[in-house]
Amino acid sequence: MVTTKTTTTEVPEFAQKIRDQWLSAVKQSQQFSVEAAQNFVKAASVLPVADLPTVPGVADLPSAEAVTKFAFDFAADLLKVQRAFALELANALVPEKTPQSA
């Protein structure tokens, strides 16, 4: 996973620290979840597997990885569009600073 850190100078330093701590906590929680899932799969792999009937069409469905990538790509694109909209709206609603009001 590639991470990039963007620092915005207009946001107070304490807010940046909270952001960094929050993201670190989320990453740590995610790592614990992945490890728990891996341990569960390892433990369950020794259990007998029931012979279930096949459901027509299931083999043609995309993989969980493909669906996950598609969903996150869509969410990222949507967030990008929403960000641009929010910034444009904020610029329209907040008057520009002039040298006298700065």
Image (tube, grey):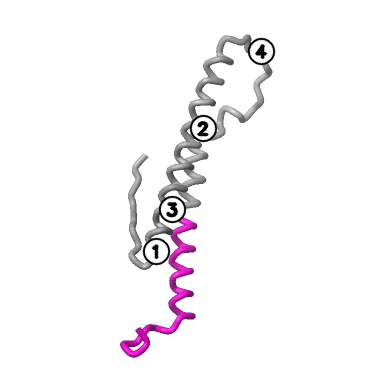
Q: Amino acid at mark 2?
A: Ser
Q: Amino acid at mark 4?
A: Asp
Q: Is residue 13 above or below residue 34?
A: below
Sequence-first tag of 4 and 2? 4
Local secondary structure at mark 4: loop
Sequence-first tag of 1 and 3? 1
Q: Give left or right: position of 56 versus 85.
A: right
Real-space Cα distance between discs 2 and 1?
43 Å
The residue that appears at 49% across and 63% down in the rendered structure is 82
- Please give the residue where the numbered disc 3 appears in the rendered image: 19
- Please give the residue where the numbered disc 1 appears in the rendered image: 12
Picture coordinates of residue 22 (x, y %)?
A: 47, 48
Sequence-first tag of 3 and 4? 3
Seen from the viewer's position, the closer of residues 55 and 52 is 52
Sequence-first tag of 3 and 2? 3
Real-space Cα distance between discs 3 and 2?
33 Å
Picture coordinates of residue 60 (x, y %)?
A: 56, 31
Judge depth for marks 2 and 1 and give the one in front. 1
Q: Amino acid at mark 3?
A: Arg
- Please give the residue where the numbered disc 4 appears in the rendered image: 51
Seen from the viewer's position, the closer of residues 89 and 24 is 24
Segment colored magenta:
77-102
Local secondary structure at mark 3: helix
- Please give the residue where the numbered disc 2 appears in the rendered image: 63
